[in-house]
Image (cartoon, grey):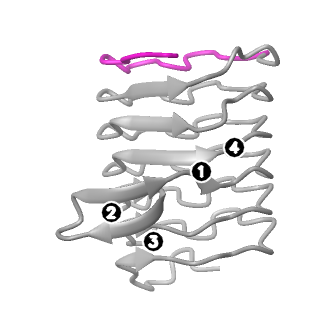
Amino acid sequence: MFANSGVTFSRIYNELGTLQTAKEMFYLCSANHWYGHLPNLNNGSGMFRACFNLEHFASGTNKGNGTELNAEAIDMDSLTDGSRMFEDCNKLEYFCAHCDNLKIAYSMFKGCPKLKKVNFASGLTSLQNADNMFDGCSELTFTCNSNYHEMHQAVHMFSNSYKVGTTD
């Protein structure tokens, strides 16, 4: 939809309640914050891929100079395919979402060297493919209350992620 369009966003706040498929919707977009909910999104493959300015992906409000977030988890409970969703978002620092049904997270955050915190608020109990999921996330602290009982593939899941903090 907006891929390679030259459209400039500083912040995207939208309730895209009926959106189900968004393959590469914002590919190469220049937005730096996303605050909307995506409750019916099931295919987000490459949705924000190479959005070089995207810093935060969380629901809430931006306070002051953008360094403080009133962050709550984004509703993405219908998401099943998050492959390459944030790949090469080299300024992405924070992600917080409910992804109860996420099955495919292949390279979801690959190439996000500034990613500091990822919070899958309700766990990842359906996750099956996490190949290269956090490849190159060298500042990562990972929080997830999950037992990964469905996981089949996790090749290089944390490859080149030197500071992986905790997996709760």
Please name the residue shown 71% across and 66% down the image: 22
Compared with 108, 20 (above or below) is: below
Question: Decide: marks 4, 1 in contact (CB < 8 A)?
Answer: no
Amino acid found under the numbered disc labelled 4: Cys
Residue at mark 1 to residue at mark 2: CA–CA distance: 15 Å
User: Mark 4: few, some, or many residues within 10 Å (few <14, many ≥20)?
Assistant: many
Q: In x, y percent, where is residue 9?
A: 40, 81
Specify whether 84 is left or right of 95.
right
Question: Which residue, given by chain and number where applicable, does mark 4 sit on?
Answer: 99
Please name the residue shown 69% across and 54% down the image: 76
Residue at mark 4 to residue at mark 3: CA–CA distance: 23 Å
Q: Earlier in the sequence, mark 2 or mark 3?
A: 3
User: Mark 2: few, some, or many residues within 10 Å (few <14, many ≥20)?
Assistant: some
In the image, is residue 100 part of the stretch drawn in magenta?
A: no
Q: In x, y percent, where is residue 152?
A: 79, 15
Which residues fall within the magenta stretch?
152-168
Quadrant hosting residue 125: top right
Label 1 residue SS: loop
Residue 85, numbered circle: 1
Can you tell which of label 4 and label 2 is closer to the viewer? Answer: 4
Residue at mark 4 to residue at mark 1: CA–CA distance: 13 Å
Question: Which residue, given by chain and number where applicable, does mark 3 sit on?
Answer: 29
Residue 53, numbered circle: 2
Label 3 residue SS: loop
Q: Earlier in the sequence, mark 4 or mark 3?
A: 3
Amino acid found under the numbered disc labelled 3: Cys
